[in-house]
Amino acid sequence: MPLRKNLPILGLCIMVLPLSCKKDEGPPPVDISFLIRQWKVLSIAEQTTLEPATGNYYIEFLTNKGYGVALDTTVDVNVCGGQYTVPEKGKMLFQFMGCTKVCCDSDYAKKLISVMGTLSGKNASYITKGDSLIISGTGKLILLKK
């Protein structure tokens, strides 16, 4: 019979116990509002060779975690894009980069696509300084400006 006396207390404990356990929500999301815009490519680097842009090239980061690479429309015909995430401040992960394969892009466009392709599927780092954004990883670097 002692169980019968303690049954209401046991029932209360069973009802309150799930409320006291809080699901681990992890770290707060990283503010990426500074990133959401079109950035002009100033230069790219493979290993130690910094190469200034030879035309108007842009990388645009979208709010839905998509990005697009706009090549110089006066000389290039293809476009590229994919998905990105920012798991923590200073880190980016590019995924699913794809490009159209129509024809005849400039050598610089091919290098930019190659650098972005190298970063795809790997962790990259980013640094912001004023109105500049530097994305780097695996010996590659992209210097962008607002």
Image (spheres, rainbow, N blue to C red):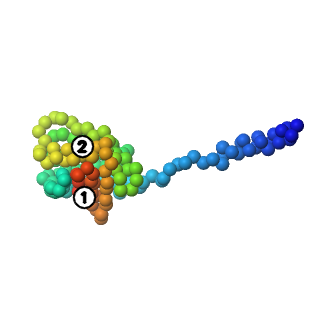
User: Where is residue 8 drawn, in percent x and y?
Assistant: 81, 41
User: Where is residue 7 drawn, in percent x and y?
Assistant: 81, 39
| Relative horizontal placement of residue 101, taking residue 120 as reference (left or right) | left
Q: With respect to residue 16, does 45 lie above or below?
A: below
Q: Give the farthest residue toward the front.
A: 2
Mark before the other along the chain sequence, 2 or 1:
2
Q: Residue at x 16, y 46 (%)?
A: 111
Q: Which residue is mark 1?
A: 145
| Relative horizontal placement of residue 125, taking residue 103 as reference (left or right) | right
Q: Give the farthest residue toward the bottom.
A: 130
Q: Secondary structure at mark 2?
A: helix
Give the number of callouts: 2
108 vs 33, nearest the viewer: 108
Q: With respect to residue 37, does 129 lie above or below?
A: below
Indicate the quadrant containing the N terminus: top left, top right, bottom left or bottom right.
top right
> Is residue 33 visible to us here?
no
18 vs 102, nearest the viewer: 18
Q: Secondary structure at mark 1?
A: strand
Q: Of the residues shown, which amino acid type is indicated by label 1?
A: Lys
Q: Which residue is mark 2?
A: 117
State the separation of the CA atoms marked 2 and 1. 20 Å
User: What is the quadrant of residue 83 in the picture?
Assistant: top left
49 vs 112, nearest the viewer: 49
Q: Are marks 2 and 1 in contact (CB under 8 Å)?
A: no
Q: Which mark is residue 40?
A: none
Q: Of the residues shown, which amino acid type is indicated by label 2?
A: Gly
Q: Give the farthest residue toward the right.
A: 1
